[in-house]
Image (spheres, helix red, strand yellow):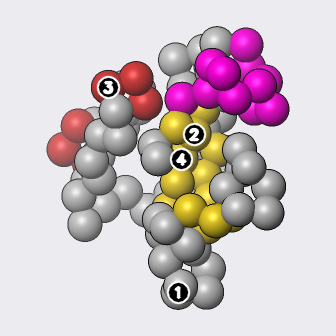
Amino acid sequence: MRWRKLTPSLTTPCRIPPTECDNVAITDPSFTLLDVWGQPYRLSMDTDGDGKVSDPEHPGMWLAHPVIVWSAGDDGNPATWADNIKSW
Protein backbone atom coordinates (compact mmCIF):
# COMPACT_ATOMS: atom_id res chain seq x y z
CA MET A 1 0.00 0.00 0.00
CA ARG A 2 1.26 3.49 -0.80
CA TRP A 3 -0.12 6.49 1.09
CA ARG A 4 -1.56 9.30 -1.02
CA LYS A 5 -1.69 12.96 -0.17
CA LEU A 6 -5.27 13.79 0.81
CA THR A 7 -4.96 17.47 -0.10
CA PRO A 8 -1.91 19.73 -0.25
CA SER A 9 -2.96 21.28 3.06
CA LEU A 10 -3.05 17.90 4.82
CA THR A 11 0.57 17.04 4.15
CA THR A 12 3.31 17.41 6.69
CA PRO A 13 6.97 16.48 6.38
CA CYS A 14 7.68 12.86 7.10
CA ARG A 15 9.85 12.55 10.20
CA ILE A 16 11.48 9.33 9.04
CA PRO A 17 13.80 8.89 6.04
CA PRO A 18 11.79 9.40 2.80
CA THR A 19 12.57 5.88 1.60
CA GLU A 20 10.70 4.57 4.64
CA CYS A 21 7.55 6.70 4.17
CA ASP A 22 5.68 3.93 2.31
CA ASN A 23 4.04 1.12 4.27
CA VAL A 24 5.00 2.54 7.64
CA ALA A 25 3.88 0.42 10.57
CA ILE A 26 3.73 2.69 13.58
CA THR A 27 4.36 0.65 16.70
CA ASP A 28 5.66 3.44 18.94
CA PRO A 29 2.66 4.78 20.94
CA SER A 30 4.39 8.14 21.36
CA PHE A 31 4.46 8.71 17.55
CA THR A 32 1.93 11.34 16.46
CA LEU A 33 1.27 12.82 13.03
CA LEU A 34 0.86 16.57 13.45
CA ASP A 35 -0.80 19.14 11.21
CA VAL A 36 0.91 22.39 10.25
CA TRP A 37 -0.36 23.99 13.49
CA GLY A 38 1.26 21.30 15.64
CA GLN A 39 -2.03 19.57 16.49
CA PRO A 40 -2.60 15.83 15.96
CA TYR A 41 -4.61 14.70 12.96
CA ARG A 42 -7.89 13.01 13.76
CA LEU A 43 -8.74 9.72 12.10
CA SER A 44 -11.85 7.56 11.82
CA MET A 45 -11.81 4.08 10.29
CA ASP A 46 -14.52 1.66 9.19
CA THR A 47 -14.34 -1.16 11.72
CA ASP A 48 -17.21 -3.36 10.54
CA GLY A 49 -16.47 -3.59 6.81
CA ASP A 50 -19.52 -1.68 5.58
CA GLY A 51 -17.37 1.03 3.96
CA LYS A 52 -18.83 3.82 6.12
CA VAL A 53 -17.71 5.91 9.07
CA SER A 54 -19.62 8.20 11.37
CA ASP A 55 -19.56 11.83 10.22
CA PRO A 56 -17.81 13.84 12.97
CA GLU A 57 -19.14 17.10 11.54
CA HIS A 58 -22.76 15.90 11.49
CA PRO A 59 -23.41 13.48 14.38
CA GLY A 60 -25.85 10.72 13.48
CA MET A 61 -24.89 10.88 9.78
CA TRP A 62 -22.57 8.51 7.91
CA LEU A 63 -19.89 9.04 5.27
CA ALA A 64 -19.32 6.46 2.53
CA HIS A 65 -15.56 6.25 3.12
CA PRO A 66 -13.56 3.51 4.83
CA VAL A 67 -11.15 6.07 6.36
CA ILE A 68 -11.38 9.80 6.98
CA VAL A 69 -8.74 12.17 8.33
CA TRP A 70 -9.15 15.72 9.52
CA SER A 71 -7.27 18.54 11.19
CA ALA A 72 -8.72 20.90 13.79
CA GLY A 73 -7.50 23.79 11.67
CA ASP A 74 -5.90 27.06 12.60
CA ASP A 75 -7.84 27.53 15.85
CA GLY A 76 -6.95 24.03 17.12
CA ASN A 77 -10.57 23.34 18.04
CA PRO A 78 -12.01 20.27 16.28
CA ALA A 79 -15.57 21.41 17.12
CA THR A 80 -15.34 24.56 14.98
CA TRP A 81 -15.72 23.11 11.49
CA ALA A 82 -15.39 26.38 9.54
CA ASP A 83 -11.58 26.14 9.60
CA ASN A 84 -11.15 22.36 9.87
CA ILE A 85 -9.35 20.66 7.01
CA LYS A 86 -10.87 17.32 6.06
CA SER A 87 -10.29 14.53 3.59
CA TRP A 88 -13.92 14.11 2.53
- Residue visible at 64% across and 44% down in the picture: 42
Identify residue for label 2.
Answer: 70
Comes first in the chain, label 2 or label 1: 1
Comes first in the chain, label 3 or label 4: 3
Mark 3 in CB contact with mark 1 (< 8 angstroms) = no
State yes or no: residue 45 in magenta.
Answer: no
Mark 2 in CB contact with mark 1 (< 8 angstroms) = no
Comes first in the chain, label 3 or label 1: 3
Identify residue for label 4.
Answer: 69
Res. 25 in view: yes
Identify residue for label 1.
Answer: 49
Comes first in the chain, label 4 or label 1: 1
Q: Is residue 61 above or below residue 87?
A: below
Figure quadrant of residue 13: top left
Residue 72, horizontal then vertical, whole percent: 67, 28
Q: Amino acid at mark 4?
A: Val
Residue 29 falls left or right of residue 51: right
Q: Over which residues does the magenta segment extend?
A: 75-85
Residue 8 - label: 3
Residue 78, horizontal then vertical, whole percent: 75, 32
Helix, strand or loop for disc 3: helix
Q: Amino acid at mark 3?
A: Pro
Mark 4 in CB contact with mark 2 (< 8 angstroms) = yes
Residue 77 falls left or right of residue 17: right
Q: CA distance from mark 2 to mark 1?
A: 21 Å
Residue 53, horizontal then vertical, whole percent: 61, 67
Q: CA distance from mark 4 to mark 2?
A: 4 Å
